[in-house]
């Protein structure tokens, strides 16, 4: 959508839409750069950090089930983000029922 901003889509309206829904909407299944699977749980209210939501982890990097919440704004001692979203995923391909985690 952002690529079409200013061409097919009104840039101002798209910006408002992204601020309301987030880059990664709540309920979106994501793969983190740490190979952990997670569910976007809460968007970041800071517009500068809109791509760094709170995530409910579903599996760790080995695929083992976990129940933990992480904030993607957390940084390590060098000032680098500890985790980032690598890509979004289709929950059906992973056999994940999102309702189990959202309700």
Image (spheres, helix red, strand yellow):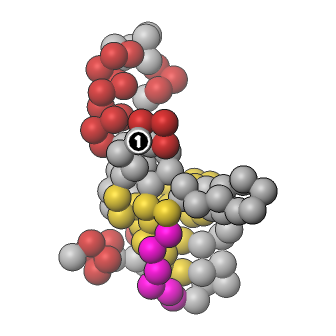
Of residues 86 and 48, the one drawn nearer to the viewer in this rendering:
48
Q: Position of residue 82 (x, y in %)?
A: 66, 62
Judging depth in this view, the residue of 103 and 46 nearest the camera is 46
Q: Quadrant of the N terminus?
A: top left
Q: Residue furthest right?
A: 78
Q: What number of labels is visible? A: 1
In this rendering, would 22 be left or right of 61?
left
Q: List the single residue furthest toward the front.
A: 77
Residue 22 painted magenta: no
**Residue placed furthest toward the left:** 103
Q: Position of residue 36 (x, y in %)?
A: 60, 72
Q: Which residue is mark 1?
A: 46
Residue 19 in sight here: yes
Regarding residue 29, the answer to whether it shows in the image is: no
x%, y% of residue 30?
Answer: 50, 61
Residue plotted at (46% across, 20% down): 4
Which residue does the image show at 32% across and 72% down from the upper left? 98
Q: Main secondary structure of the magenta part?
A: strand
Q: Secondary structure at mark 1?
A: loop
Which residue is located at x 58 percent, y 60 percent? 74
- Relative height, residue 7 to residue 59 (above, below): above
Q: Which sits in the foreground, 77 or 85? A: 77
User: Does 36 appear above or below 64?
Assistant: above
Residue 58 vertical position relative to residue 19 in the rendered view, above or below: below
Q: Is residue 66 magenta?
A: yes
Specify start and end residues of the magenta stretch as a single range. 65-70
Left or right, 66 with respect to 33, comes to left
- Label 1 Cα neighbours within 10 Å, binned few <14 / some 14-19 / many ≥20: few
Which of these two is toward me, 33 or 4? 33
Quadrant occupied by the C terminus: bottom left
């Amino acid at each position: 959508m952002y690529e079409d901003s200013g061409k097919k889509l009104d840039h101002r309206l798209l910006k408002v839409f992204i601020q309301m829904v987030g880059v990664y909407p709540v309920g979106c299944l994501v793969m983190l750069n740490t190979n952990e699977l997670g569910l976007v749980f809460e968007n970041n209210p800071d517009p500068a950090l809109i791509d760094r939501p709170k995530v409910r982890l579903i599996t760790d990097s080995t695929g083992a089930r976990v129940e933990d919440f992480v904030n993607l704004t957390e940084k390590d001692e060098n000032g680098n983000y500890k985790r980032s979203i690598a890509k979004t995923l289709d929950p059906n391909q992973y056999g994940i029922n999102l309702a189990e985690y959202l309700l």
